[in-house]
Image: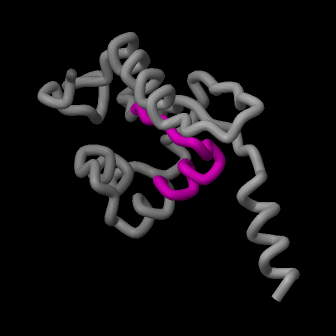
Amino acid sequence: MKDRKAHKSAYKEMKFKMGAFQIRNLSNGKLLIGSSPNLSAIWNRHRFQLNMGSHRNKLLQKDWNTGKEENFVFEILEELPHRDDTSDYSEELSLLEEFYLEKLTPYDERGYHRVSKRR
């Protein structure tokens, strides 16, 4: 039982790369912008959902289905540095995502975000 607790505790102490990312369609240049406290895991999640046909973004899903996985790349836009404390980074991640949504304007023909999603 101690091994399991030790592994769980060690996992909680791990510091993953976090920040803003984009998924870019190489064939048409469209972007999906997002943020995550674990940049390695988020790409795996998106790819899994897209390969299963269950991604919540139907426009991205449609392009994924008609193209190939090789037509899409995952790119880190900016990483947030970890602080010494065990802070919640959700507000900073949200602000960083909003910054890139405003900067890159991935709406309409430029991306997979809907105009009504703008804040």
Residue depicted at 57% across the width and 42% down the height: 37
Q: Residue furthest top?
A: 103
Residue depicted at 77% across the width and 53% down the height: 13
Q: Residue furthest front?
A: 85
Residue depicted at 87% across the width and 81% down the height: 3
Left or right, 100 with respect to 16, comes to left
Residue depicted at 32% across the width and 45% down the height: 60
Nearer the observer, 71 or 23: 23
Q: Quadrant of residue 5?
A: bottom right
Left or right, 73 with respect to 103, comes to right
How far from the left and from the top, in percent, is residue 119? 21, 21
Q: Is residue 79 magenta?
A: no
Q: Is residue 36 magenta?
A: yes
State how many labels appear: 0
Q: Which residues are magenta?
A: 33-46
Nearer the observer, 89 or 33: 89
Nearer the observer, 107 or 91: 91
Q: Is residue 101 above or below residue 6?
A: above
Q: Residue furthest bottom?
A: 1
Q: Is residue 51 above or below residue 22?
A: below
How far from the left and from the top, in percent, is residue 9? 77, 65
Q: Quadrant of residue 2?
A: bottom right
Nearer the observer, 7 or 114: 7
Left or right, 90 with respect to 5, comes to left
